[in-house]
Amino acid sequence: MFGNMSHFALQQYWWIIVSLLASFLVFLLFVQGGQTLVYRLGKTETERSLIINVLGRKWEFTFTTLVTFGGAFFASFPLFYSTSFGGAYWVWMLILFAFVIQAVSYEYRRKPNNFLGHRTYETFLLVNGAVGTILLGTAVSTFFTGSLFSVNEYNFSRWETPFHGLEAAVNVQNLSLGLAVFFLSRVLAVLYFFRNVDHAEVIARARKQLLFDAIPFVVFFLVFTVMLLLKEGFAVDPVTGVVSMEPHKYFHNLIQMPVVLILFLAGVLMVLLGIIRPVLHFIKCHDKGIWAAGIGTVLTVFSLFLVAGFNNTAYYPSTYDLQSSLTIRNSSSSHYTLTAMSYVSLLVPFVLAYIVYTWRAINKKKIDASELESESHKY
Amino acid sequence: MDASLVDWSRAQFALTAIYHWLFVPLTLGLSFIIAFMETLYVRTGNEEWKRITKFWMTLFGVNFAIGVATGIILEFEFGTNWSNYSWFVGDIFGAPLAVEGIMAFFLESTFIAVMFFGWNKVSQKFHLASTWLVAVGASLSALWILVANAWMQYPVGMRFNPETARNEMVNFWVVLFSPVAINKFLHTVTSGYVLASVFVVGVSAWFLLRNRHQLLAKRSIIIASVFGLIMSFFLILTGDGSARLLARHQPVKFAAMENLYEGTTHAPLAAVGILSGTRNEHRQREFLLKIEIPSLLSLMAFHDAKAYVPGIKDLIHGNPERSIISVEEKMAKGRLAVTALKNFKEAKEEGNLSRADSARVIFEENFAYFGYGHLTDVHQAIPPISPTFYSFRIMVVLGMWFVLLFLLSLYFVLRRKQPKWRWLLYAAVLSIPLAYLASEMGWLVAEFGRQPWVIQDLMPTSVAVSSLTAGSVKLTFSLFAITFTLLLIADIKIMTRQIKLGPKDGGTL
């Protein structure tokens, strides 16, 4: 089946898989967003515990998706893995540290004799929520703005600035996407709480909070999108592989790939609907917002990744040396490896099926304070 | 490449891997022990089994969290600190990592939520199935990363493509089912099962010493001892397999493990040995003390007491009688391969196809020694002897002790010998840190022993490293050292408190 596909078709297939993983990851960042709202929405110890326990049942999905995203990127586009991780060292290290401290915090927070005290673990969750989302967004934005690296004839790469990735944070467009992801994760968290928390005060505060996060999200996302559509992009000649600058490249990509344009518009619309309907019709719609905004997030991120990598575009451009830029053709694994992994990818629907099944089993009813009382394992 | 950068990068990887490995084996083994216990609960309906299951599950949860925390770094560290390596082997190495994520990590993380939060939400059988799936998922996670590690020790199923300057996979099944991969997987996971069994026996022994939770402790000892004994059998079997594979595929590591300098037939095994602190000009270390078992090394390596086992001298300086070529010759061939690859690239750039073809021929003839082309001194091909030698012995001796511990504990519980045998209970408690020591020693043998290679014969560690400053890596090393140490202290404090609280007090807060 996959063995007969061309190398380019397999590269596209794997770009789609990586893009899907990225989109699910951004949706699942609602856990991180929620972590930054613990003190904002929870005024008593019980309320904070309730919020943390609601998030704590899902944190591993986000974490696992991040790890799988990294693994899949390594396997399918190893030149990206070696160039970006080894080069933008500090950005990735900061992201990793943010996730290291998250992984223990849920389990250790309320355990007796936990050495650092529950406030420290709650601070870890806050740091993970803020740093993780902002830096992931910033790192992804460099797919459109470029980085300073070179790749030699042996495909060994070198970062050409001593800042090793920190320079990405001083670019307005990168920062806009970072902040957009941050505020989006908080919006998604609020919508998730509407659906899964049964606590009047927490929900009342979450309701007030929604627009405080939704408005900055829309502003930063707009800044990023407008800059994206107006800027010149990194075009690749499909025959020679030569990379050159093309005005309005990303705008052209959307026009030249109408399906992607539709996905993008539908995604943005659904996110906005997911926010606006609970604002206008809270009683009727508050627990449905996460569906619309969640699906919308997945569609939007997915379409942005396709804009970055499809239609003869360099998805990881080098502004230091244009010809070092990475494309899905020049950075991928071999035909054989992509074929072998494509067979493994057939497991993905099965994996999704059991995730959905168990997710529903655990989320059957909203969590309230009494459930927390009776639960033997809690965070 | 800056030696300091290479050393700090190695130190960082070693630090993070050693920390990670403090938590993984317990996860691997305890998940199965919990699954056995819950199975007994479901089959008998005895609430005590549920209580026992939940107690060990609490400890599992504490350990699992820090295992996850220390694990994420390793996956990304291949890229952040070993960038050149990531490209050189990404076509092979990346695939197991991706499969690990898709197949194993999701299995583990999805069903762990059911395991912890599903007691009152899903049926008893579904809960039990989830607990088993967590156990299977944990071992499956280990499978893929160990396949990748085995490939570094014994690279097979690939071809070097000079166009892309990397190794490319040509047969997935050969990579997955390479004898080194299978043996490494079985040896490593069974070592985890044994460690977890020692842990459970040790904690239970502590309860017995305190006269607390006697039923829980005795039942736990029976399950863990039986599991530990069965797994020790496989551990020894696969350990024996490792020795033979090493002798064949990594003879220098094998010789370093034994500090065998001169090759010989009827090679003896140094059952006990103390090495001198200084090395001679050939980096040889003399034995200050040695108790040997005649011919055992030959027997271990080749299942033949008369077999010839090459020593470090033969492997470094060559032994024409035994058709062993010297490192000097290998370095010459390696340099030919490195130059041929350079010529190939230049010829391609110029569009000179005939020059490119002849360069490719030279390259392919000498590729087996490609990594030697980067060495500057023959002695660089010798791994550090002392840590390899001692780690191996500590691991084996402790492994034997654990077998005895399981046998005695089982006997003790079944024959109700408690009052007279308190020494055994103390020994069981003290064995917990020893199990961790043995487990880490196993990795030290494997990883010190393969130096200077990151990929056996093809890529030395010094070439694999990312182009960073040593200062950056020093800083991240320090941050990891501080963070992981703080988290380890927290982990130990929480664990010991949970053990002290015991199951009756609810296990958790």
Image (tube, coloured by chain):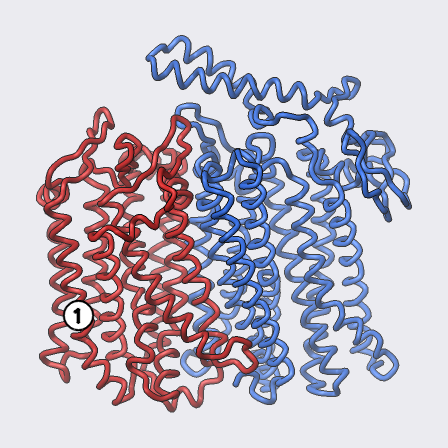
Does residue B390 appear left or right of residue B186 in this picture? right
Q: Nearer the viewer, residue A192 or B176?
A: A192
Does residue B362 appear left or right of residue A38 in this picture? right
Q: Position of residue A220 (x, y in %)?
A: 17, 60
Q: Give the residue at x 56% y 72%.
A: B490
Rendered view: A332 above or below A368 = above
Q: Give the residue at x 57% y 71%.
A: B491
Does residue B224 appear left or right of residue A59 in this picture? right
Tally of marks: 1
Q: Quadrant of residue B87?
A: top left
Q: Which residue is mark 1?
A: A214
Q: Note whether residue A343 is visible.
A: no
Rendered view: B116 above or below A2 = below
Q: Position of residue B16 (x, y in %)?
A: 55, 55
Q: Which chain is blue?
A: B
Q: Position of residue B287 (x, y in %)?
A: 87, 41
Q: Give the residue at x 53% y 44%.
A: B148
Q: Which chain is red?
A: A
Q: Nearer the viewer, residue B36 or B61?
A: B61
Q: Nearer the viewer, residue A180 or B438?
A: A180
Rendered view: A257 above or below A67 = above
Rendered view: B246 above or below B135 = above
Does residue B412 appear left or right of residue B509 in this picture? right
Q: Note whether residue B440 is visible.
A: yes
Which amino acid, mark 1? Ala
Q: Quadrant of residue A148?
A: top left
Q: Nearer the viewer, residue A175 or A372?
A: A175
Q: Chain of mark 1?
A: A
Mark 1 lies on a secondary structure that is helix
Q: Position of residue A69 (x, y in %)?
A: 36, 52
